[in-house]
Structure formats: C-alpha cells, structure tokens
Amino acid sequence: MNEMKFDLRELALFAEQAVTKAGDRISELRSREKIEVNYKDYGELVTSADLLSERTIQEAIMGKFQGHRILSEENGVHNWDNFKFDGPVWVIDPLDGTVNFARNLPHYGVSLAFALDGVVLAGAVYAPYLHCT
C-alpha cells in the first residue's frame, strides 16, 4: 500500500464541489443552447455537456492535485482492465445518464471518486436537475 496520507474530508469536500460546479455548468449549457449530440466508437452517445463536465472536473483536479492521475469515461480509455490503479487516481463519469440528458429527462448525474492504490476512499455524485449531492 502506498504511504501517502490524505485528508478524506478534504477529498470528499473537493469531490462534492467539483461535481456541483460541473453539474451546474452543464445545466447552464442546456438552458443557453442546443446540446450537441455525437456518438463514440462503440455507438454510445456523447454530448457537448459530457465534454464540458469532464473538462471542468479535470481542470479542478489538475489545479489542486498535481501529479494525481485521472481516468475519465470520455478521455478515450475504453479498456479499464489494462489501467494501473496504483497511486492516487481520480475517476470521473462526467455525465452519467447521457441518454436521459439528451432526451431532456431529469435522471442524470455527475460522478467523481478518489482512489488510492485501487481503493476508493472518497467521492461524490451530483444530480443537477434534482439539486442534490
């Protein structure tokens, strides 16, 4: 096990703030403009909101936790079996429920977890439409 020490309350608060900011940004995007919808290699939907949320969370992580790795659904990593979960890793699902979001349904969320050596220690999920974390 890695000898790094982390304040779990700080990590959980950071995760909550990051998902809330990302979720609020995608809600603002939806209210301002038509959401762009595209398809990934595997036929799964990806929207401009997915990418905005991912970028918002990645920037927050890189600004506060230099040296931590990031694994995100939209960043092109499709084979998680080969991903090495050693050390500190942030795992992002920038828009869980993309199909619902694209169809203007309220059931979607933004998820972020912090793992150390493959063990999730903190995280948060935010449902923007429902305003709850």
Image (tube, helix red, strand yellow):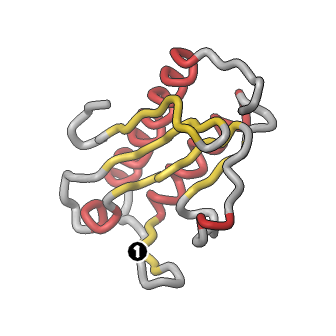
**Which residue is at a point 63% across and 69% down the rendered structure image?**
76
For residue 75, side relative to residue 12 (left or right): right
Looking at the picture, tell me which residue is in the foreground, 84 or 123. Answer: 84
Q: Quadrant of residue 132?
A: top left
Classify the position of the C terminus by image quarter.
top left
- Specify few, some or many for label 1: CA neighbours under 10 Å numbering under 14, 14-19, or 20 or more: some
Classify the position of the N terminus by image quarter.
top right
**Which residue is at a point 71% across and 18% down the rendered structure image?**
5
Question: Would you name the residue on which mark 1 appears?
Answer: 45
Q: Position of residue 38 (x, y in %)?
A: 45, 78
Q: Position of residue 21 (x, y in %)?
A: 47, 34
Helix, strand or loop at label 1? It is: strand
The amino acid type, in three-letter code, at marker 1 is: Leu
Taking the view exactly as shown, the residue that stands out farthest to the right is 67
For residue 79, side relative to residue 67 (left or right): left
Residue 132 lies, with reference to residue 38, above or below; the image says above
Residue 61 lies, with reference to residue 32, above or below; the image says above
**Which residue is at a point 61% across and 66% down the rendered structure image?**
81
